[in-house]
Amino acid sequence: MSSKSDATIAEEFQAYYLQRATKELAEDLDKVRSADDFKNDAIPLLIHALQQGTTMFSAEDKRRIVAGSEARAEGKGN
Amino acid sequence: MAKRSSMGGDAAGKPRKRVKVVHEAPTSEEIHTSRQLQGLLAPDQDLKKARHGLQSFKVFLDHINNGDDGHEDKREILNEYLASRKPRADDETPIYLPDIMETWSYAGQTNNDNILSAVPVVLALLLRILSQSLDQVPYGLGICRTLLRKRQQELISRNLSADKGKEFIISPTLRLLREAICFDGGAMARPIFRARNYTFKSLGRNMGIKYLGEGREDPKRPSARTNAVRFFLSALKFLHPEAKKELLSLRDIVTGLTKSIREDPPHLILETLDTLKTHVLLDEKLPREAKSKLLSANTLTRIASLYTYDDAASDAEVNRPVDEVTHAFLQIACTLPSAGVLRQQSGFYPRGTEAEDDSLLRLRSSDDVGLENVVWMNKFRDEIPVRNYVLSEFTQNLRPWSNIKQSELLVTIFKAAPELIADYFQKKRSFTFEPKLSATWIGYAALLFNAVQVDIPEFFGQSSGYSPFPPPTSIVLDNILPLPLNQKVLVRCLAQKSNLISFFVTRILVIALEKLAATLKLYQEAAGSNGALWSEGARRLVDEFCQRCPSMKDIVNSYRSIPEDNILHREAASRLLLRYYEVLPQVALIAKFDVSPFLVTCIKRLRTEQEDSSSEDRNLGLRELEHLLVIAGHSPGMRWFSKLEGLVLSPFLTLLQLLVDSRQDISSQKLLDSINFVAEEQQVVLAREGGRGLAPLVQTLQLLRKTQATEESTNNVWTFINNCVARCATAPIKYLEMMLDILGSGSKIGGQDGDVPQISPLHMALVEQIPFALKSASSDTVRQLAQFISLFLGASKAAGEDPVLLERVFSELRSHFPEVVQKKALKEFPSGADFEQRPRVTEDLRMDIDSPDSPARGNNVAAATESLDQLFDQPSEYSLDNSALQKWVNKAADEIVEEGYASSLISLLASEHTSIRKEAVTNMLKMAAKIQQSDYDEKEQSHLLLCELAETAKGNVDAAPLPNTIISFACHALDVLKNPLHTMYAKVNSFLTSGPVWKLDRLPLVHEVLQEEPSEDDQYYAELGWLLTYLLDSLRTGSDLALFHKKRVFEQLMSLAGNPYMRHNMRIQILGILYRATGIQGGSGTLMTRFGVMAWLESRQAAAAESGGGEDSVYPAMIKRVWETADQERALAWSRGGIPEILGV
């Protein structure tokens, strides 16, 4: 069983988190886009703001969430 | 008055009028010979002619410089000309290019601007051309030296300070200077700088003559500012540190450099930033003060304005965007200590807290102090005197909420100088965090999140260890929950309809609580040396935090309003609630929050979304569930086993169902841990250290799920289990009593201690409830129930529960089933062979007997030997830490006894160094005195023990370490004294009062435990357990072994093991002591020849095989161990060959 590196897992988790957050907050994000102070350079800031929540998850948590099936095999091995 | 004089003497009297500058286009001719060139450049009173000559020369030089056709011939002509005008070698003050210099001088006298401009143009060009050829370098240097002659300096200075409008004079002069300062690798930089009164004249002003046209400046037609800046940058490149320092102290130049940097073309900005970085920031020889002269808050702010520089329309050659280069520059400038901006700071201790005046010093030595005595404790609520005032001022000018790089820069600065976090937000108090769905609010929220995430500096910013005084509470709090996050704003954010706002705030609160927890831990660590003040500081911090954070009610309301599908948000909210329980239990428990409805919602969602949701979503949902489960564990009112609205089964059973249905991954393992905890705590299943009591039931249900059963029968089985579990949880005593009844009816069943059940009480509930379940059940259900029972008992047996007792349960259960079922499904007691065995490695001797026997099921002696090592291997030497002599000194009496400081000190009596032992005795007496004077509850007994031990040791430690038996006894006795409810309390006390000195050749209390009756009737085994642990600890060296031998300890222990009522783990403890003896030189031999251990082990094996329980496999491994560690020749002779027989070899 090839286990993914922490970096790959972190990347996958980040992608998942962002996709999940945009889905959950879609309505509000639309409203923000139409706010007066929303300019082009606000987009990277917005993405950064959404993504920073990933730092609340430990590497182990991230692995558990994005690689459930892989982690299962490892868990059993232990 | 310099400007007026330049207009000529007459001009002084006339009214000032703008002089109209008429530019006549100069004429020129092509140059073919050096002689022609000489003629053209020869000084002439007719300045028109002179201009013609200079212009022709310029065109000529341009040809060469551009490398146009025939440039080589032209270069030849130039060389010839230069050679012809070269000063004589013996000339003391040689003047190079005397013709041009004379023309220049004459133009100066006659105020001819055209010539004044044309001369520097040709000289700059000429220098550039000369710099390209190595042969001509000396000539170029000669020209440079000529430029530094008095007359030329004056002309240069005059040109530089020409009217602002005369850029055509200023710019070429600056170019000329730049060529000169760069010439030959900066060979002339020093003298040029020395003549700075002329050469750097009006540089600051000239930096202000910027391009005024539309769009950006054309790089081919640089403005005076561009030329001035480039000259300055070249000077920075080539000047030595001392001169650079002086240059940077010229205020008007440094200000001029960045004043209008935002309007500069991109290439100039990049050149400026690159040069400043390489030749100022990173120049290690340049003193810090010089750098800080350049990097004032104003300069930094101006540079930071480049973050929003629009370079989209600029030339494509520059592929480094200005904002990125600016960002990199500022990051170095603001965070590199040697760059001159960042100053040393002490984190959470601002200026004014370091002065240790007399009153504070007195505080340190006094015992009864409070934080109110620390004068500065409440001083910094409105203003914080930071050491990094430049950065403090600069950061206020950033706009981190609208630009990600500025936000990043600010956070990097916060990390480098944590003192600035509180200061920044204090000054930004007016910038509110009132909820508003806008980009600015989101940007600000992101900044706050990052600021809260910045780590707490080591020792809160003190350089060497914790200060005796905790940092000002307001500052610590501002670092955990920065000022814009006050209770009012936070509550409003949480109550927002917009999920985005409440989600962001929830996340910030989660990390703030986590940071608070980390801070409190540090406070605790710091309290080690100066307890009272730090503990009070921690209390204050929590109080103030509670006043600033929202109440539980607000959090719960916000959680309730999150749509069910927003699992990311729900996970964060549930985590926030959990953090309240963990970090602020006082707040959480007052709120009387009922977690059950949330739990129900969460479980229901997880059960319904199995099919269509992604595994990530599910795992995230499981995390929410885990948080809620832990909260439920914290909530005293959680109803695990009663039916809740919305659920068919109780929450506990629903979770079990969820677990059984789920895939087996790490998430489910955590879920299992959570509900296992509940099951064990409520005594539904047998609690086991290192294992999961609930595992057999889960395994059973998982297997049962795979059988082909009707939905109805499956549901009935679940309802039955639900019923049994609920009954078991509500009245565990009843089922324990039932178990005792069954025990009573069987004569030789394990678990004779009476108080420790060896099977899960749930089995008893099954026995009680099965008749009712079978009464109205369909045949399908009956079959399914029978299958469940068969599997469950098998699994329990495989998990190590008492097989005899289980068999009895089985026959009880079986008797209620119809005969057909009895003959088929419940034909015989299940072997449990279907169930996976998971060997558990135990570290604790008192652990469950299952550990060694699981791998040994196949009579695999090798495996058992291995597990023997794991089971018994314990350090046979004390970990002697000499610092124990000191460590106790600052501790309170209760800590000394209860945290092991006393034990560590006692252990030092075994040290091989006489001085340490002696010191230990002295310290022990001091310790005893300290304890006696304290208000520790057990002070008298502890004092007595330490004094007696010291008295015993006094005469004896001079020659040799104290016997391990005595040391071990003292340590274990001290453990007993801590707890008056300990079973050995009475015996230890009567031993202590029996005499002031202990005999070294005796093993205290062995006789009292083994031969006398226990102090309480049912405490015999508990006393024995204590004794065995203490004896094991005592046996470390050959002399200990001899004492054991002499005192017949082994005989007594071995006969003790014959007691059929003794629990497995006690026997294992006895084996542990024997195992320890085999590890000592001569131990195995003694055991074999003096105590007949081989025969004893053999007989024990036979007895164990008879009673079952898997203990039997340990004995062959022990026999092997004894044989391997003994002197085999002697043993063979002694046994006359009998031993190999036992070994089976």
Image (cartoon, helix red, strand yellow):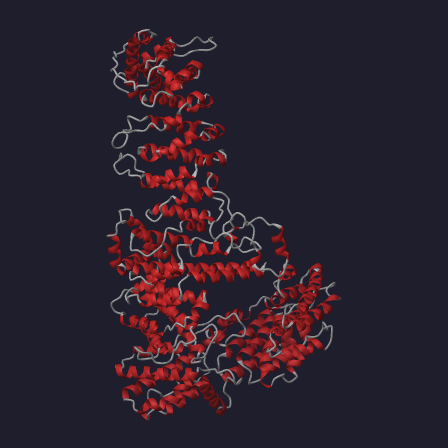
Q: Considering the image in quadrants, where does the C terminus of chain B appear?
A: bottom right
Which residue is at the front of the view, B859 or B188? B188
Q: In this view, does B716 lie to the left or right of B865?
A: left
**Residue B1139 location, x and y as percent?**
59, 76
Tell me the quarter of the picture where residue B515 sits. Answer: bottom left
Q: Where is B488 relative to B353, above or below?
A: below
Is there any visible trace of residue B666 in the rendered image? no
**Residue B990 location, x and y as percent?**
68, 79
| Residue at image location 52% in from the left, 76% down from the top | B1114
Q: In this view, does A62 lie to the left or right of B1044?
A: left
Q: Where is B784 relative to B881, above or below?
A: below
Which residue is at the front of the view, B83 or B783? B83
Which residue is at the front of the view, B744 or A37? A37
Q: Where is B430 relative to B234, above or below?
A: below
**Residue B1124 location, x and y as percent?**
58, 70
Q: Considering the image in quadrants, where does the N terminus of chain B appear?
A: top left
**Residue B929 location, x and y as percent?**
69, 66
Tell me the quarter of the picture where residue B373 sits. Answer: bottom right
Which residue is at the front of the view, B123 or B249? B249
Could you tell me how many numbered marks the image carries? 0
Tell me the quarter of the picture where residue B314 sits. Answer: top left
| Residue at image location 51% in from the left, 44% down from the top | B344
Is there any visible trace of residue B225 in the rendered image? yes
Q: Is residue B25 left or right of residue B290?
A: left
